[in-house]
């Protein structure tokens, strides 16, 4: 499958996400970094370049995620998949506190926060500003 993503498809994915990272919820208009189109399941793992497998992602989340799709949590042998913006509901896996820190509600949320580094200092600062401006969700 091709990795090429047309401008039309890029625009569709960004618009569908309301121009916010589908993982950490940072707004593209207020971001310090450029946004990417992420293959939720990477091409190397058999993912397709189709709307169902693409997510709008900030640079920090996309680079930290890479081609990973899951991680081990704690001292267990349980492999936990990441949050999938196409099939999961954000509020069922994450919550946000008053200072912009994301907290896991589920193991899927915890795995995603861990590997994507969703509480990266710049992301927290951006979320704080979004909260202040009334732009976070």
Image (cartoon, rainbow, N blue to C red):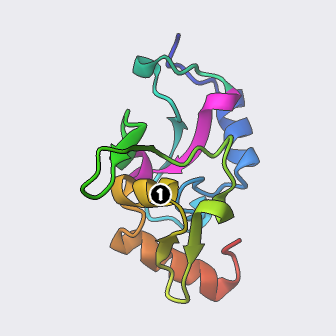
Q: Is residue 55 magenta?
A: yes
Residue 106, relative to residue 86: is it above or below? below
Percent from the top left, x then y, of residue 15?
74, 47
Q: Residue at x 60, y 64 (%)?
A: 27
Placement of 71 over or under 54, stated as above or below = below
Farthest residue in the left direction?
A: 75
- Give the residue at x 71% y 71%: 137
Q: Position of residue 87 (x, y in %)?
A: 68, 41
Q: Is residue 78 left or right of residue 106?
A: left
SS assignment for the magenta stretch, majority: helix
The answer to which of 131 and 6 lies nearer the viewer is 131
Seen at 47% across and 78% down, the residue is 101
Asked if the magenta segment contains residue 89, the reply would be no
Q: Is residue 51 above or below residue 135?
A: above
Q: Nearer the viewer, residue 69 or 80?
A: 80
Residue positioned most to the top: 1
Residue 92: x, y in percent? 66, 62
Q: Where are the magenta residues, as a range?
A: 51-63
Identify residue for label 1.
107
In this picture, residue 87 sits left or right of residue 56: right
């Amino acid at each position: 499958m091709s990795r090429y993503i047309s401008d039309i498809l890029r625009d569709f994915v960004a618009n569908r996400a309301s121009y916010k990272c589908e993982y950490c919820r940072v707004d593209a208009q207020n971001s310090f970094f450029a946004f990417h189109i992420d293959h939720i399941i990477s091409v190397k793992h058999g993912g397709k370049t189709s709307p169902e497998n693409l997510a709008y992602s900030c640079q920090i989340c996309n680079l930290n995620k890479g081609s990973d799709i899951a991680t081990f949590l704690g001292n267990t042998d349980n492999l936990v998949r990441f949050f999938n913006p196409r099939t999961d509901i954000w509020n069922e896996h994450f919550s946000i506190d008053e200072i912009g820190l994301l907290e896991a509600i589920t193991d899927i949320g915890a795995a995603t926060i861990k590997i994507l580094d969703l509480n990266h200092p710049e992301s927290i600062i951006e979320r704080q500003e979004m909260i202040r401006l009334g732009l976070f969700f």
